[in-house]
Image (cartoon, rainbow, N blue to C red):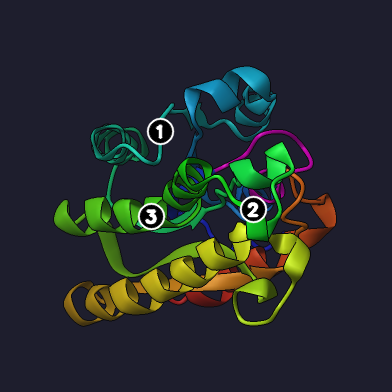
Amino acid sequence: MYNLLKGKRGIIFGALDENSIAWKTAERVHEEGGLFVLSNAPASIRMGTIDELAQKTGSQIIPADATSVVDLEILVDEAVKILGGKIDFVLHSIGMSVNVRKGNDYTNQNYDYTEKGWNVSAVSFHKVMQVLYKKDAMNEWGSIVALSYMAAQRVFPDYNDMADNKAYLESIARSFGYFFGRDKKVRGKYNFTIANGNKSRSSSQRFWGVCCFFRKNVTSG
């Protein structure tokens, strides 16, 4: 490896087990010398094997519900303290559709489920960015990356309400990315994956684009 991320600090959301994009990204960031904290919802931490990733990468886990601004504020404060400085990169690898899990078709949604999935999959990205923005927690030329899917821009009927969630997430990346870039010189981006929205986890083969983004954008800062 080339230590391309040596000295860079980050937060990685969403690692559940070794099949997660966030898990594979964390491994590569570690191999390239990056330091980071891992975060996921408390229930996901109990259900998954993130402890193994933390041990492998020498990282600390900070539980946080990404839909809770209070949790995110605590997370960012703790991350800056643990890592010894402001953040250079953030990966938002969070997504969930209750309608998909319950087998509800796009034409037969339970709107309580729709709102919950929208909050988790899309609005959480705005909350993450807003907390980082207000706390001035990002270094200049840092990058904040979320994962999207082509169904945000094309018709994939079986992707269900996740297509709407990803379209909303992309809009957040563009809009908040403008303010972060203008005011903080920080990049807010989304990166396409080919993950199947009907699964709660993404294949380990689908993480490379995120690593390439970090290598291209974070290392230049």
Q: Residues within 10 Å of mark 3 (few under 14, many from 20)?
A: many
Residue 134 among those drawn in magenta: no
Q: Nearer the viewer, mark 2 or mark 3?
A: 2
Tag 3 residue: 123
Which is more toward the observer, 141 or 62?
62
Tag 2 residue: 108
What type of secondary structure mainly makes up the magenta span? loop
**Which quadrant holds the N terminus?**
bottom right
Residue at 60 percent across and 29 percent down: it is 54
The magenta-colored residue range is 14-24
Task: Give the farthest residue toward the front.
Answer: 108
Going by the image, does 208 lie left or right of 85?
Answer: right
Sequence order check: which comes first, mark 2 or mark 3? 2
Task: Quote the CA–CA distance across marks 1 and 2.
Answer: 28 Å
Which is more toward the observer, 158 or 199?
158
Task: Quote the CA–CA distance across marks 2 and 3.
Answer: 22 Å
**Which quadrant holds the C terminus?**
bottom left
Query: Taking the image as drawn, is residue 118 in sight?
Result: yes
Q: Is 18 placed above or below 168 here? A: above
Tag 1 residue: 65
